[in-house]
Each structure stands twice: as C-alpha cells, then as structure tokens.
Image (cartoon, grey):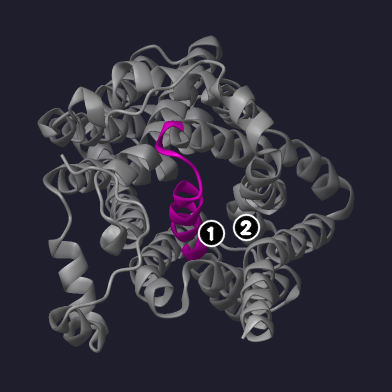
C-alpha cells in the first residue's frame, strides 16, 4: 500500500512535460498510476453505484405500492439522514479502530441486511429501523472513503482518483436507474401481476441486494497498510484539533454546511418539481434523472483535468459560480425544455467541485485528522438533508417552489463567496504581499 505523500515542489522531468502538453495522455497516465487498492475501491464503488441506482428509482414506488404515503417516505429520508448526521463523528473513531477495508465491508453488508429485511418484512417500523441501519452504513462508508483515497494515492493522481471515484459512482447510478426501470415489468410478467404491484417491486429490489453483495468482493481484496502507515485517532481528536486550528476547520466545513442547507431545500424534491410544475410522467422523470446522473458522472470524470490546469480551488469557485444562473433558470423558467437543459448543466457544474474540494481539504490537515475532517464534513452535508426538506415542504404547500429555489440561490451564492474569499483571494493576496516584501528587501 502506498504511503500518503504531502505536497512537494518537484521539478518535472521531460516525460512529465510531454504528458502535460496532452490532457488525454495526462489523464491516462494518472489512471495508470492508481494503486491496486484504489482500483479495488473503484470496482466496489461501481457495483454499489448500480445498487444505489436501482434503489433510488424503485424503493419509493415499493413503499407507495403498499398503501403508505409520501409522508412516510419523508420520515424514512429523515431517519436515514439524521442517523448519518449524528453518528458521523463517532464513525471517524470507529473507522480508525477497525481499519478502512473492514469499514467498507461492514458498511456494505449492513446495507445488504437492511434491504433484505425491508423486502422480506415490509412495515413502517421495519422501514424506519432499517433506514437507521442504512444511515449507519452511509456514515461508515463516507467517513472511511476520504482518508482511504488519501492513503492510497500520490499527489499527482490524487485529484483524479477523488473525481474518478465520484464519476464512476454516478455513471453506475445512471446505469442502475436505466436498468431498474425495466425490472418491475420483467417481474410483473413472471409473476402475472401489474408492474406497479408490490411483488413486482420487491422482485426488482433483490437486484439491489445482489449488486451490493458484489461490491463487497473488491473490498475483500484490499490490503491493509502496515501499522506504521496507519494514522492514530483519539476520540477527543476533533476537540483537540479544533482548539489548535479553529479558523482552518471552520473554513473547511462551513461552506459545505451552507451548501447542504440550500441543496436540501430543492434537491430531494426534483421529481416532485418536474411532476407538479412541468406535468411530467414518472417515466419521463426517470429518463431525466438517468441522463442527469450520467451528465454528472461525465463532469466528475473531467474535473481533475481542469483542476490540474487551473488549480483546485479555482475550479471549485468557478464551477459553483457558473452553476448559480442555471439554478435560477431551472427554478423560474416556465419552459420544460429550458428547465431540463438547466438541470443538466447545473447538476454537472455544481457537483464537479465536490471531490476536488474534498481533495483540497484533506491536504490541509494532518493524516491523523483526516477521518475526523471527513466525519465533520459528512455531518455538515447531512445536516441540510435532514432538516431543510421539512421547511421546504411547508413552503411548497403554501407558496410553491419559488421560495425554496430563492433560498437555495442565496445560500449557494454565500458558500461560493466563502470559497473565493477564504481560499482563492486570500492566497493571491498572500502571494502579492510576499512579492512586495521581496522587492522592498532587494
């Protein structure tokens, strides 16, 4: 297993210079540099993405087919997100105790158990209990991923690995959504029931279990680092680190928190938005979502080339800033075609920045603090998804989608300004001050 390499100023050799002139050669070179552990992680991510795509498309229909309401679906989302929010920090401690490989295995097996129980014993109490298990699974996986990718990459390919893993996940999710759309009809024909029957949906959901089980196999093939390569972690690490560097930690987490609050206002309701505002069918929405996931996957895959060319924080600021006008167009245009185009562009631009900033943030802290930082960022992300949907639902009932979109636009603008002022402008200001100081000394 590769050790973590910190940023170093190294003179490029001729081969590197030749590669850098061709972005496609650069990309291939970076992909070839992925360690075996990183490749196993990508395969695991792909299979789990397939499971997530099928589940994302069909699980809500499965619950509704049993006579439960949209309110039940909202409670399940809240239970899962709240669990992830509340357990993210202790999961950082657990991940370092049981090691990253075991964290992935445990996370995916917990998801398999949760899905199996919801298929075999469907009821509101079981759905809620297993949503909590899924929240634990999600927290464990998210907290382990960032430090694992840092430990299994060098600086040259690190941004590519972070972005490529996110791109692979979204591409697999898109495939899962396409594939999942045919499954209820297939099982309906086999079982001689309607495609909207609970039995058809439950048969289809077994593919979620199958794909999630397949994701465990690459995780089993991962190799653990030696003891001296593993970062130590104390249960009090978050408090001691915050005491040492409160400003740095706040700047690395607060923009993500504000973004998540904005995202939680509209993103969980995009299917409802297209149905209620643009009167689209479920089938059309499924196609929109599948192409959206594919577009996002493409953006995530090309993001590291842009980051290497223009700089990590520059790409974060520019992609998020450019996504804001398209969010406004999506929320306020009366034309369906324009809304769909805006949805694809906004989704691609806004999500390109995620893995790039994750890489940037991980590079700003010591190895022993990375699991803690991943925990806190997971908490920040899930905070918005746990609470904003409730507020948004109330606003939608009384005023429609315009107020939620307006709030999201304001919050996205604030978070983008934070990234710019704290990480881009401040860095340029420091460089300028150093240049002036050198000139004055000479």
Please provide percent x and percent y for residue 10: 29, 69
Q: Residue furthest right?
A: 398
Q: Quadrant of residue 113?
A: top left
Magenta stretch, overall SS: helix
Q: In the picture shown, does residue 44 fall above or below 63? A: below
Please provide percent x and percent y for residue 438: 61, 80
Q: Which residue is mark 2?
A: 275
* Residue at x 61%, y 24% (from the top left corner): 240
Please provide percent x and percent y for residue 71: 67, 30
Q: In the picture shown, does residue 269 fall above or below 108? A: below
Disc number for residue 216 = none
Q: Which residue is mark 1?
A: 281
Q: Quadrant of residue 40?
A: top left
Q: Quadrant of residue 229?
A: top left
Question: On the rendered structure, is 61 left or right of 390?
Answer: left
Question: On the rendered structure, is 76 left or right of 420?
Answer: left
Q: In the picture shown, does residue 440 fall above or below 170? A: below
The count of marks equals 2
* Residue at x 79%, y 54% (from the top left corner): 404
Front-lying residue, 288 or 182: 288
Task: Answer whether residue 361 is magenta in the image.
Answer: yes
Highlighted magenta segment, given as a residue range? 352-368
* Residue at x 34%, y 24% (from the top left corner): 107
Query: Do residues under tags 2 and 1 come within 8 Å of each other at their CB atoms?
Result: yes
Task: Answer whether residue 418 is magenta in the image.
Answer: no
Question: On the rendered structure, is 340 left or right of 180?
Answer: right
Q: Residue furthest front?
A: 442
Compute the Cα span from label 2 to label 1. Answer: 6 Å
Say if residue 237 shows up in the picture: yes
Judged from the image, the secondary structure of the residue bearing numbered disc 2 is helix
């Amino acid at each position: 297993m590769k050790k973590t390499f910190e940023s170093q100023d190294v003179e490029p050799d001729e081969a590197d210079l030749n590669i850098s002139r061709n972005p496609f050669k650069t990309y291939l070179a970076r992909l070839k540099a992925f360690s075996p552990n990183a490749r196993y992680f990508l395969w695991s991510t792909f299979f789990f993405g397939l499971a997530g795509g099928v589940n994302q498309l069909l699980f809500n229909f499965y619950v509704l087919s049993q006579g439960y309401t949209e309110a039940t679906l909202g409670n399940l989302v809240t239970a899962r997100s709240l669990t992830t929010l509340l357990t993210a920090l202790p999961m950082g401690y657990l991940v370092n105790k049981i090691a990253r490989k075991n964290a992935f295995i445990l996370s995916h097996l917990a998801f398999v158990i949760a899905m199996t129980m919801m298929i075999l014993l469907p009821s509101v109490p079981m759905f809620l209990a297993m949503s909590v298990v899924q929240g634990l699974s999600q927290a464990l996986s998210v907290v382990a991923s960032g430090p694992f990718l840092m430990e299994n990459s060098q600086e040259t390919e690190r941004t590519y690995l972070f972005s490529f893993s996110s791109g692979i996940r979204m591409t697999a999710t898109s495939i899962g959504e396409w594939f999942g759309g045919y499954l209820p009809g297939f099982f309906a024909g086999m079982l001689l029931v309607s495609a909207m029957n609970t039995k058809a949906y439950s048969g289809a959901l077994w593919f979620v279990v199958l794909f999630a089980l397949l994701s465990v196999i690459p995780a089993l093939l991962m190799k653990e680092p030696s003891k001296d390569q593993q970062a130590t972690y104390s249960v009090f690490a978050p408090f001691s680190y915050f005491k040492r560097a409160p400003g740095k930690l706040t700047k690395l987490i607060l923009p993500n928190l504000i973004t998540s609050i904005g995202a939680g206002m509209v993103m969980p309701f995009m299917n409802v938005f297209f149905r209620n505002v643009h009167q689209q069918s479920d089938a059309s929405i499924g196609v929109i979502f599948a192409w959206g996931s594919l577009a996002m996957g493409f953006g995530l895959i090309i993001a590291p080339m842009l980051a290497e060319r223009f700089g990590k924080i520059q790409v974060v600021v520019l992609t998020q800033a450019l996504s804001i006008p398209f969010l406004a167009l999506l929320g306020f245009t009366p034309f369906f075609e324009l809304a769909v185009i805006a949805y694809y562009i906004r989704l691609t631009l806004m999500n390109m920045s995620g893995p790039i900033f994750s890489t940037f943030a991980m590079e700003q802290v010591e190895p022993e603090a990375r699991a803690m930082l991943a925990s806190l960022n997971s908490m920040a992300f899930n905070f918005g998804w746990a609470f904003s949907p409730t507020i948004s639902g109330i606003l939608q009932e009384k005023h429609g989608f315009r107020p939620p979109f307006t709030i999201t636009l304001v919050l996205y603008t604030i978070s983008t300004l934070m990234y710019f002022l704290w990480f881009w402008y401040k860095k340029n200001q420091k460089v300028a001050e150093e240049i002036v100081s050198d000139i004055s000394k000479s």
